[in-house]
């Protein structure tokens, strides 16, 4: 059932409900579109460091797929973004500004999309803006709707104020989730980093914070990293895998110690995602399992999988990121001998891929 509003208090209630029950955002932007005589309402977010989303009311889902194939944040492709960057533009950007921005487009991709779905006109306002993220509210209007009137833009401006308050409230609620989850893992005495929808660290446990000063793990511009480039690349690959839809447990990353053993095993897991969640909510967790390999580690591998001590040592070295030539040299065996030993390790552990073996070595040590 459509939500309607007849006064400012109603709009406040509609958008407060959306912040507290995010599945109601669809109703809120649909009500906004109806009240302003517009074909669609839109809430959109993108940016260099943001997780993109695009919520449009009463729309054919195919527009979302087509939109995703276009860089909507590019001002020389998307005239709405270009209009927002015009000098001295007002808080409510509208068709007069779109006309100017369309003159500087380098391609027709976004124009074609607007033509296909009849959404050339409308107006927009920024709700959240920072160096790496933008969340905006917009009316998308078709030929039958015509251009926005001053009265419609004034109503939209009032509604945008309530929407801005709702986004900030939902942001605060979602970010509180980092503190709640971090507190849970603190009680479990684990080094954990919570990641938002961009893959950046949004919170961590005290043990994780302490690990930053006693290990090669660091947080650089919000991203988990290592002081070794190859380890940082592996971490970022796993973060992308766990963050990007559909979200899956990513390959663990082994950080080696000075002797080539596994000093830290980083594991990455997705968290449940609610529909209509903004980018501020926790989306994934990275867990550090700490502890250099020991005789006990070798014994666990030999007892669990019936590996020989030599095979256990090879598995540990491989999980730590050592190359096969380096392992062969360290053990004083030929490449052919190492190949035979690796085949035996894979057979005994039931692994098909090296990443599976890395995961097993990390888990069996704790």
Image (spheres, grey):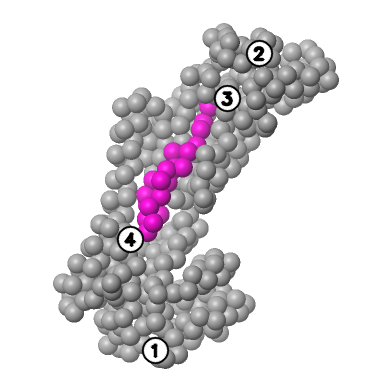
- Decide which of tag 4 and tag 1 comes sooner along the chain: 4
Magenta residue span: 263-285
Q: Are circles 4 and 1 on residues that touch, CB within 8 Å? A: no
Q: Are circles 4 and 3 on residues that touch, CB within 8 Å? A: no
Q: Alpha carbon of mark 4 to alpha carbon of mark 1: how far? A: 27 Å
Residue corresponding to mark 1:
145
Q: Where residue 307 is drawn, which disc sits there?
A: 2
Residue corresponding to mark 3:
360
Q: Nearer the viewer, mark 2 or mark 1?
A: 2
Q: Alpha carbon of mark 2 to alpha carbon of mark 1: how far? A: 73 Å
- Decide which of tag 4 and tag 2 comes sooner along the chain: 4
Q: Is residue 264 left or right of residue 170?
A: right
Residue corresponding to mark 4:
23
Q: Which of 246 and 244 lies nearest the eye of the viewer?
A: 246
- Decide which of tag 2 and tag 1 comes sooner along the chain: 1
**Residue 41, percent across and down?**
37, 75
Q: Is residue 310 visible?
A: yes
Q: Residue at x 45, y 90 (%)?
A: 143
Q: Residue at x 70, y 22 (%)?
A: 347
Q: Alpha carbon of mark 2 to alpha carbon of mark 3: how far? A: 13 Å
- Decide which of tag 2 and tag 3 comes sooner along the chain: 2
**Residue 90, percent across and down?**
35, 78
**Residue 237, percent across and down?**
59, 42
């Amino acid at each position: 059932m459509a939500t309607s509003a007849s006064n400012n208090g109603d709009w406040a209630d509609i958008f407060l409900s959306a912040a507290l029950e995010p599945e109601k955002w669809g109703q809120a932007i649909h009500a906004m579109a109806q009240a302003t005589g517009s074909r669609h309402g839109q809430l959109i977010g993108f940016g260099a460091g943001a997780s993109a989303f695009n919520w449009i009311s009463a729309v054919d889902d195919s527009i979302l797929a087509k939109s995703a194939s276009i860089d909507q944040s590019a001002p020389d492709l998307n005239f709405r973004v270009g209009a927002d960057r015009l000098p001295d533009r007002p808080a409510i950007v509208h068709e007069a500004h779109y006309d100017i921005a369309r003159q500087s487009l380098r391609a027709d991709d976004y124009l074609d999309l607007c033509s296909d779905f009849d959404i050339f006109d409308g107006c927009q306002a920024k709700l959240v803006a920072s160096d790496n993220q933008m969340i905006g509210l917009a009316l998308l209007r078709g030929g039958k709707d015509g251009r926005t009137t001053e009265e419609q833009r004034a109503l939209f401006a009032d509604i945008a104020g309530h929407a801005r308050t709702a986004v900030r409230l939902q942001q605060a609620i979602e970010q509180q989730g980092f503190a709640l989850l971090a507190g849970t893992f603190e009680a479990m005495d684990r080094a954990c980093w919570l990641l938002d929808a961009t893959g950046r660290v949004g919170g961590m446990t005290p043990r994780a914070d302490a690990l930053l000063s006693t290990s090669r793990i660091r947080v650089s511009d919000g991203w988990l990293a290592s002081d070794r480039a190859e380890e940082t690349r592996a971490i970022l690959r796993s973060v992308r895998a766990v963050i990007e839809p559909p979200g899956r447990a990513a390959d663990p990353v082994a950080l080696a110690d000075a002797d080539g053993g596994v000093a830290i095993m980083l594991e990455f897991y997705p968290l449940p995602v609610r529909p209509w969640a903004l980018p501020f909510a926790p989306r994934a967790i990275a867990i550090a399992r700490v502890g250099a390999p020991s005789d006990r580690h070798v014994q666990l591998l030999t007892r669990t999988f019936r590996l020989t001590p030599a095979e256990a040592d090879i598995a540990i070295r491989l999980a730590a990121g050592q190359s096969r030539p380096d392992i062969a040299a360290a053990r004083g065996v030929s490449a052919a001998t190492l190949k035979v030993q690796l085949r035996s390790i894979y057979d005994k552990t039931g692994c098909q891929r090296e990443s599976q073996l890395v995961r097993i070595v990390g888990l069996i040590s704790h």
